[in-house]
Amino acid sequence: MADIILHHYDASPYSEKVRLVLGLKGLAWKSVIIPNVLPKPLYTPLTGGYRKTPSMQIGADIYCDTQCITRELERRFPEPTLYPDGGEGLHYALAAWSDKVFYQAVVAVILGTIGESVPRAFILDREQMRGTAFDFARMRAAVPVMREQLRAMGDLITGQLRDGRLYLLGDQPGLADIQAYFSPWFLTSLVPEEAEFLNALPGVPEWQERVRGIGHGQREELDASDALAIAANSVPDTLPDEDAGEPNAIRPGDRVEVAPDDYGRDFVKGELISSSPQEIALLRRDQELGETVVHFPRAGFVVAKLH
């Protein structure tokens, strides 16, 4: 099998989620560092225009969004499993909480505390992604309310650990732990004083240490141009597959476009090659890269048929 290549940057909270999954599975992987703002000239050609971080490349198959990445890693490397309790659905249902409710509260506290000292290029990029300007005065005023939200989130974690279990769903680490861990990790990384109360909740420091100890697997750096060359010299593994339950009558061979449903809505266009309730994959043809297949999750993304 081709190498696992993670396109990320070290401070990216969603990338930390994937790095821990790679660590839990004990995998070796190649690291390509991408810019945290546009332009991303050696990244977006690979993804077809998708700009968010991270994505995972295996040969000429590109997996966008952590949902898609973690599902593919579990499919290819089922042991040790990300779902030691057997409840795959619950682990992914938690993403709606961790990726939005918990994470957005963390971002609000970070921007309300240090937003005006963040590099202007980063702020402009995120304003463009969200389609609205940041109001730092309102963000500062909202910090006390957001602290209350974070306390509520942290109490859910400490409540799970109250019976002495080592991890959120039992005595083995799983995706649920990684989902809950990355937001406090991000807050601690950027505004440690605002994370103190969260990180001191009963059972939480010890749990965090155990999750941190999972590590990141075996990382090796790779130049972005080499990753593009790997894609250009590879053939996608994905085979055509029709979803009989597809609710909107799209079929392999149809031209479609896909984008996140929240922000960073840069539509990626291609030919539908396969779909399922949880994933959609687009075949793309590029003059430089040849054929690639870009994979997206269905939850949290919109799909439109092109006419």
Image: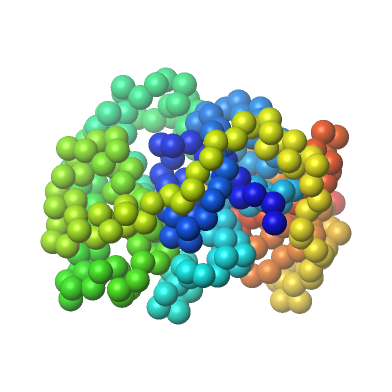
Q: Is residue 51 left or right of residue 22?
A: right
Most extreme residue toward the bottom is: 86
Q: Is residue 158 left or right of residue 211?
A: left
Q: Is residue 93 left or right of residue 192?
A: right
Q: Is 52 in front, or is 109?
A: 52
Colour scheme employed for the rendering of this structure = rainbow
Instruction: Note whether residue 128 is visible.
Output: no
Q: Position of residue 159 (x, y in %)?
A: 20, 69
Q: Quadrant of the N terminus?
A: bottom right
**Numbered-mark total:** 0
Q: Residue at x 44, y 55 (%)?
A: 23
Q: Residue at x 60, y 35 (%)?
A: 222
Q: Residue at x 17, y 62 (%)?
A: 203
| Residue 221 sits in quarter | top right
Compared to 179, does 223 lie above or below? Answer: above
Instruction: Note whether residue 234 is visible.
Output: yes
Q: Is 14 in front, or is 61?
A: 61
Q: Is 246 in front, or is 280?
A: 280
Q: Residue at x 52, y 55 (%)?
A: 27
Compared to 64, does 289 lie above or below? Answer: above
Q: Position of residue 111 (x, y in %)?
A: 31, 34
Q: Position of residue 266 (x, y in %)?
A: 64, 40
Q: Position of residue 33 (x, y in %)?
A: 54, 33
